């Protein structure tokens, strides 16, 4: 159980760590912290916390599940009142995925997005066609099969070397 004996900063850090450890409902190999959708956590008062989440895209159906999972985890650790607020600005980009998150995606068989590939003030437009490395054999000889895969944030590709299909987490 998290106790009030910790200082406010230490308590916020511990609660943020707990909230960030929640697995993503669509990519359970990643935590919300590794995915970069956990934007903030503030203690509003004794036993009252507000968590800020940014979905990977507007209208993402997983945001409700993420919110419920965060509330459950924090309730289990002694926080009775947990509000989860959706924050759309600034928008989430694939640049928010941590290095560890990118490693886990590739290990799971999903080609991770390129670092710095998301839109932003210095990155310019997102490339529609790019070289994507196969997470199975490492070849860059891959073909786009569908711009959308099991979720809107992934594309379906096939490696021409090992012939295996795989998801590619699109740069956003």
Image: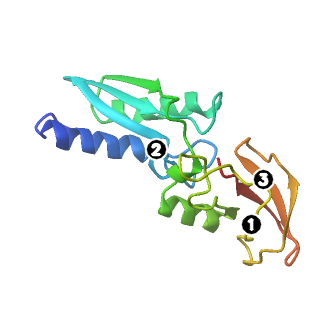
Report the residue at 50% width, 50% height from top: 96
In this rendering, the answer to whether 133 lies above or below 96 is: below
Q: Position of residue 93 (x, y in %)?
A: 57, 45
Task: Return the x and y of residue 116 as percentages of the image width and height.
Answer: 56, 58
Classify the position of the N terminus by image quarter: top left
Viewer-closest of 22 and 149? 149
Quadrant for residue 59, please give it: top right
Q: Which residue is mark 2?
A: 22
- Local crowd size for mark 1, using a 10 Å CA cut-off: few (<14), some (14–19), many (≥20): many
Residue at left 81%, top 45%? 148
The number of callouts visible is: 3
> At which x and y percent is residue 79?
28, 28
Q: Decide which of 102, 19 is in the foreground and name it.
A: 102
The disc label shown at residue 132, or none? 1
Give the residue number, with chain letter if any, for mark 3.
Answer: 128
Sooner in the amino-acid sequence: mark 1 or mark 2: 2
At 75% from the left and 71% from the top, the residue drawn is 134
């Amino acid at each position: 159980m998290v106790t009030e004996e910790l200082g406010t900063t230490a308590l916020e850090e511990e609660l943020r760590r707990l909230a960030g450890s929640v697995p993503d409902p669509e990519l359970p190999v990643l935590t919300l912290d590794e995915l970069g959708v956990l934007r903030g956590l503030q203690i509003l008062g004794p036993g009252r916390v507000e968590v800020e989440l940014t979905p990977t895209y507007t209208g993402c159906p997983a945001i409700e599940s993420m919110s419920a999972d965060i509330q459950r985890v924090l309730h289990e650790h002694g926080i009775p009142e947990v509000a989860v607020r959706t924050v759309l600005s600034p928008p989430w980009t694939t640049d928010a995925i941590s290095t560890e998150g990118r490693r886990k995606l590739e290990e799971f068989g999903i080609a991770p997005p390129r670092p710095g590939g998301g839109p932003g003030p210095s990155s310019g437009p997102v490339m529609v066609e790019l070289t994507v490395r196969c997470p199975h054999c490492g070849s860059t000889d891959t073909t786009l099969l569908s711009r959308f895969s099991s979720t809107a944030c992934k594309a379906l590709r096939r490696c021409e070397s090992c012939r295996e299909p795989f998801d590619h987490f699109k740069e956003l």
